[in-house]
Amino acid sequence: MPLIRRLPKRGFRPIPKNYYQVVNLGDLAEIKDKETVTPEIMMEYGLVSRSSWPVKILGEGDIQRPITIKSHAFSASAKQKIEKSGGKIELIPQKKVK
């Protein structure tokens, strides 16, 4: 049997992608009774559908009141708008994907 058939086969493994659930700031502005918004609260309001996927906040829309938002990732425009309104940003650490 040829040598190439006797050796174990090893190959390229693609790097797993991070899939985010995106939420716009305009959607978060509709949550009026909470001072701190977490992915669990977003799930209660129907803004995200899966609790196992990380959440990314995008800067579409405006927010007028200061709130604390906890999420896995933020866009640059979302950070700027949240801090401009007097709110805070808290990053949640992501789980390592094998």
Image (spheres, rainbow, N blue to C red):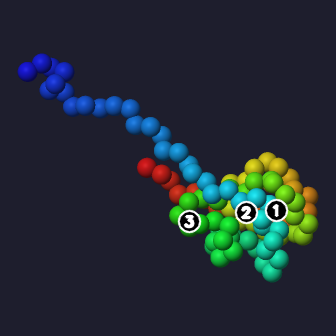
Within-10-Å neighbours for mark 1: few <14, some 14–19, many 20+: some
Question: Quick check: 64 left or right of 90?
Answer: right
Type of amino acid under label 3: Arg
Type of amino acid under label 1: Gly
Looking at the picture, tell me which residue is in the foreground, 22 or 82.
22
Q: Residue 90 bears which disc, if any?
A: 2
The secondary structure type at the circle numbered 1 is helix
Marks 3 and 1, how far apart at CA: 20 Å
Q: Residue 26 bears which disc, if any?
A: 1
Q: What is the x, y in percent for residue 12?
A: 38, 32
Marks 1 and 2, how far apart at CA: 18 Å
The secondary structure type at the circle numbered 3 is loop
Image quadrant in which the N terminus is located: top left
List the residue tagged with mark 3: 50
Q: Please say whether residue 79 is visible from this viewpoint.
A: no
The answer to which image quadrant residue 7 occupies is top left
Residue depicted at 15% across the width and 20% down the height:
3
Type of amino acid under label 2: Glu
Q: What is the x, y in percent for residue 45?
A: 69, 74
Tell me which numbered mark, 2 or 3, is placed earlier along the sequence: 3
Which label sits in the foreground, 1 or 2? 1
